Image (cartoon, rainbow, N blue to C red):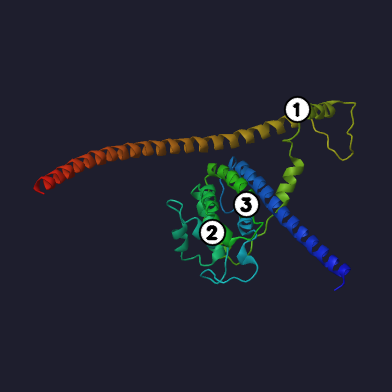
Amino acid sequence: MEPSCLQSTMALGLSSKKVSSRNIAVERKNLITVCRFSVKTLLEKYTIEPIDDSSEEFVNFAAILEHILSHRFKGDHGPVSWFSSDGQRGFWDYIRLACSKVPNNCVSSIENMENISTSRAKGRAWIRVALMEKRMSEYIATALRDTRTTRRFYDDGAIMLREESTVLTGMLIGLSAIDFSFCLKGEIMDGKTPVVIDYTPYLKFTQSSYDYLSDEEDHRSLESSTSEDSSPDHPYLPLVTAEDSWYNKWRKMEQKFRIVYAQKGYLEELVRLRESQLKDLEAENKRLQLRLEEAKVQNQLEKRELEGVILELQEQL
């Protein structure tokens, strides 16, 4: 091969690797971004009505989380030397091993469910059970600490192997403020149909969101809408009255208050749980200290007895 051809081949190889790395990074960014929007819409939905299997917000969140846990999963591409019980691998095989150390986990109960047999179906059942237990963040954080198992199941560049996984566990903490109610039956649980993420709600959300407008911009928009002589800068922008604008602001503030109130209740419950755990640890610590002191006293008695035995033996000798 001529030097020029060799250099071209090497350049194409490097370019291909760069493009592949860029694509993987964009996948991670997209999934984490839509997951953040999905969590926010779930919290907003919960302030209005309960969340169950029929809620489109939950269906989309479950699809996003399934894609995140399946991102760069080794069973999705390339040959593998070992499989799950149904002959296919999925993120459930990772969760089943990595979350086995979680106290009072639901892994064994999901494994024993009669109506759920495939790995994909068990993964979907686990997502629902973990949300109802309010322990989704705990499960994933525990799994991530088992780095050896995580690397065993995921290829380089996977979300579960990058810093985005820490962001994910932080986002999922807020879901503990929601009381989920699911039925672990139905077509979605058969594991045969792949899930698809619907991006349109989040595109609409970003286009219509006024959360990032400054007070000055809000004030200017109010002045331009209430002025009789003023005309819109763009012919397609609708005129908004001051009453509508203030009503929209009130609605947004009410939604934010409900979300914060729900999160406040969860955090208070978490504080009470930690205080109870702290009291138990303090009581256990006192019990251990008493046992240690008793062991020291016993040790001293045995030492004295041994010294007496040694003195007797020396006298006999």
Q: Is residue 104 left or right of residue 237?
A: left
Q: Residue 59: tell me if it is visible.
A: no
Label 2 Cα crowd, 10 Å radius (few <14 / some 14-19 / many 20+): some
Secondary structure of the residue carrying tag 3 is helix
In the displayed structure, would residue 87 be above or below residue 61? below
Q: Earlier in the sequence, mark 1 or mark 3?
A: 3
In this figure, what is the number of numbered marks? 3
**Position of residue 79 measured from the top left corner of the image (x, y, whole percent):** 62, 71
- The answer to whether the residue labelled 1 contacts the one labelled 3, judged by CB atoms less than 8 Å apart, is no
Residue furthest to the left in view is 316
Q: Between tags 3 and 2, which lies in front?
A: 2
**Position of residue 292 measured from the top left corner of the image (x, y, whole percent):** 29, 40
Identify the image quadrant of residue 286: top left
Q: Is residue 293 left or right of residue 3?
A: left
Q: Which residue is mark 2?
A: 149
What distance separates the C-alpha of mark 1 from that of mark 3? 32 Å
Q: Which residue is mark 3?
A: 61
Disc 2 marks a residue whose amino acid type is: Thr
The residue at 58%/47% (across/down) is 169
Q: Which residue is mark 1?
A: 215
